[in-house]
Amino acid sequence: IAFVIDTSGSMDVAYDGTSAGSRGHRDRSQPSRLQAAKEQLLAAVQVMPPESRYHLLTFADGAQQWSRRSVPPTPAATRALTDLLARIKAEGGTNVYDGLVAALQLDEVRFGQEGKNAIDELFLLSDGEPTAGKVQDTDQIAQLVREANKYLHVRINTVFTGKGRGADFLRRLAEENDGIFVQR
């Protein structure tokens, strides 16, 4: 399983969709979209079967893979994940494309070639509206992922955290890749 989490600046908005107070800052007594995504990730990892393995990737202006090898859902790994998540902050643009490229290893897929991807399921947690990267058009991102996924066969599930137009893009991404769309 690959968990791909949006850590862009828009993820610092309050989870309920309310935005800034008088100075443009989120009311810190309300959880942010990023905090909600972190909580969803920890809850998912804690109920994974012991034989499962996962990868964590984040994206903002670019993508970052947090481990080269897949991680088992052991108590020690969950503690390390909790520590790692505490250090991740929301900042930058929303480069959904680079996050998906990194998770699916799209830059390594060749036309007509069966995928060598180590994952069979992906969970994308985001507020969904691309604002950064070389591909920002949602139709183009969906098409590129759909074409590559003909060979990769990865189920792409999406979790939309927030309000706005990003929900349509994430719903489409899930539907076109045999996944489930959830709006939180």
Image (tube, helix red, strand yellow):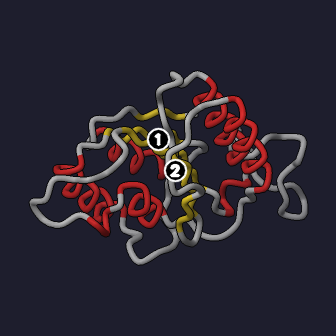
Name the side, left or right, on which 141 lies relative to 29. Answer: left
Q: Which residue is mark 1?
A: 123
| Residue situated in front as seen by the camera: 109 or 176 | 109
- Residue at image position (41%, 42%) is 122
- The one nearer the camera, 168 or 96, is 96
Q: Is residue 165 left or right of residue 83?
A: left
Q: Which residue is mark 2?
A: 4
Name the residue at 46% across, 41% down.
123
On the question of residue 18 being in view, the answer is: no
Which residue is painted at 28% across and 67% down in the image?
A: 108
Type of amino acid under label 1: Phe
Tell me where residue 23 appears, x and y as whole percent: 89, 64
**Residue flagged by tag 2: what amino acid is it?**
Val
- Mark 1, secondary structure of its residue: strand
Image quadrant assignment for residue 175? top left
- Name the spot of residue 99 as percent of width and height, x first: 47, 60
Question: Would you say the residues marked 2 and 1 are in contact, meaning their CB atoms lie under 8 Å apart?
Answer: yes
Q: Position of residue 146 (x, y in %)?
A: 23, 53
**Residue in front for this viewpoint, 180 or 25:** 180
Q: Position of residue 80 (x, y in %)?
A: 73, 43
Image quarter for residue 181?
A: top left
Q: Please rate how many residues cluster around mark 2, counting C-alpha atoms within 10 Å: few if below 14, some from 14 to 19, many from 20.
A: many
Label 1 Cα neighbours within 10 Å, binned few <14 / some 14-19 / many ≥20: many
Q: Which mark is residue 92?
A: none
As drawn, 156 above or below 24: above
- Number of labels in the image equals 2
Sequence-first tag of 2 and 1: 2
Q: Cα distance, mark 2 to mark 1?
A: 6 Å
The N terminus: image quadrant: top left
